[in-house]
Image: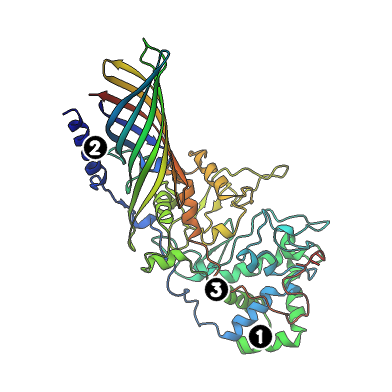
Amino acid sequence: MRRSPSLLLAFAAIVFGWSGCGDETLVVSPEHAVGALPASVPDVGPRPNPAEVELGRMLFWDPILSGDRDVACATCHHPRHAYADGVDRSIGVGGIGLGPGRKPGPIVRRTPRNSMTILNVAWNGFAATSAVSSPADAPMFWDNRVSSLELQALEPVENREEMRGDAFSEEEIIPEVLSRLSAIPAYVAQFGAAFGSAAITRETLARAIASFERTLVSRSSFDAYMAGDDDAISHAAKRGLLAFVGSGCNRCHAGPMFSDFELHRLGVPDVQGEAPDPGDGEGRFRTPSLRNVTRTGPFMHNGQMRTLREVLDFYAEIDTSLDPDLAEIVPIGFDDIIAFLDTLSDGNFDASVPANVPSGLPPGGRLATGLEN
Amino acid sequence: MAAVGGAVGFMNLELFGPGLSVRAGVDLALFRWASTRHRLLVTGEGTRFSRWGVEADFLFRGVQADVLAARADWRVYPFRSLGLHASAGTGLLVTRDRVSLELPERLVTSSDTRAGIPFELDLGWTIADRFDISGRYTHGVYLSGKPRAFGFVGIALGVRL
């Protein structure tokens, strides 16, 4: 007789435990929703012809755009590093090598900021509930200092630490680059095929590079899941998505790009021994996209966090008074969040490297250290 | 002797919130060595980790975990006149966790059931003739998948019938 109560209660526990009572659903509001990339890149007016895109690809890889002919756009936006560079702060003019193995030159050491990936940059400005009305309004750089990919494209060329160096002034460098390109018959022919005129201008140069960059698209397993493939991401990743949302990460990392493209003050530690980066002038930096985030560390505007775990630990201890959106942050379930973030990364993008560029210079600049062999 | 009990616990995966469990089984006298009594508890236990209707930002909606375990625990009472006891046990467990998230584009639902081995340490006190209270730590190691392990601490109440 004494065994009866125990058996009864054990049975009750099983029914209680598995009945599904108490199930709840976390509902995400539209303004903080995350979602798949749109089916197509946004219209930028007349669709670029293949010649324009190919010209942009050559220019992207050609170090002739830099003052000392040693740095290309691809130097710090290389497909091997998901079109970022894998270092905390980029090494532009004078540097030798690729990625974390790149060594700074003797004069200009590093740029002040981390290189953002340009994969999916065509959707910059596409937030959760509002998209930019025109690609001409798409915010660019860590401080949103310019709008549109066309305006962005030549900024690094004019920047001393990135591509210009000391041989030319900011006013001199673009005319110098245009002069160099005009002296190369292959470029003259390519500009003619792309734009119907052999005249090489600042506008056509920028437009060609931007048109190529808009072709750099990376759709991930998360996009496949959102399109209806239930098995495209793991259960842990789905739990991580819920933890991502439940933790409040989507207060800023929302929309198809997982960014609100707004400026926020986070209090990220400054680089030791260097002056604080003023960001937009008020210490604020743009929310970076989380697309391909597991392939594009180190993290934050100055690359001071080497792992996503460090980033999540930082948010767990963050001063919530710095920004109104931080008050909603409750970081929980880090392993699951990282599993989810991995579903936003995918190696299925154009990783081709041209064998040569019209200038005859090494594609991508001085990427070889001479130590490879 | 039959035994029943219950516990509240907090899983180290804070995601799932507090857990409540019901446990039942038999409490068998094994032997006595000097003043130390040795007993064996063979029990089954069901635990649910959920919000339990608690409205708090640090407990997420849309996640829930159930743990079913069958365990054998070796329990010792080292002092004849005191109710202090300690036990260690192991057995088999099955966990099932579920997520449910509604995005504007789609409903995200998923569940995952996995088997593992629990390891439990328990330190307690007999507070009345047949009533025990104890603090315990349960560590579960999954046989496959990730995460590989989980753990939770709890406060358990037991009755020996």
Which of the two discs, 2 and 1, labels the residue nearer the N terminus? 2
Picture quadrant where residue A10 is located: top left
Task: Identify the amino acid type marked 3.
Answer: Arg
Q: Nearer the viewer, residue A196 or A89?
A: A89
Which of the two discs, 3 and 1, labels the residue nearer the N terminus? 1
Task: Identify the amino acid type marked 1.
Answer: Phe
Task: Identify the amino acid type marked 2.
Answer: Ala
Q: Secondary structure at mark 2?
A: helix
Foreground mark, 3 or 1, reads: 3
For mark 3, name the chain. A
- Circle number at residue A10: 2
Question: Do marks 2 and 3 share a chain?
Answer: yes
Q: Nearer the viewer, residue B156 or A11?
A: A11
Give the vertical position of A209 relative to B112 (above or below): below
Q: Secondary structure at mark 1?
A: helix
- Circle number at residue A191: 1
Q: At x 41% / y 45%, what residue is drawn?
A: B116
Query: Residue A311 location in percent, x, y?
Result: 55, 47
Question: Do marks 2 and 1 share a chain?
Answer: yes
Foreground mark, 2 or 1, reads: 2
Query: Residue B36 location in percent, x, y?
Result: 41, 16
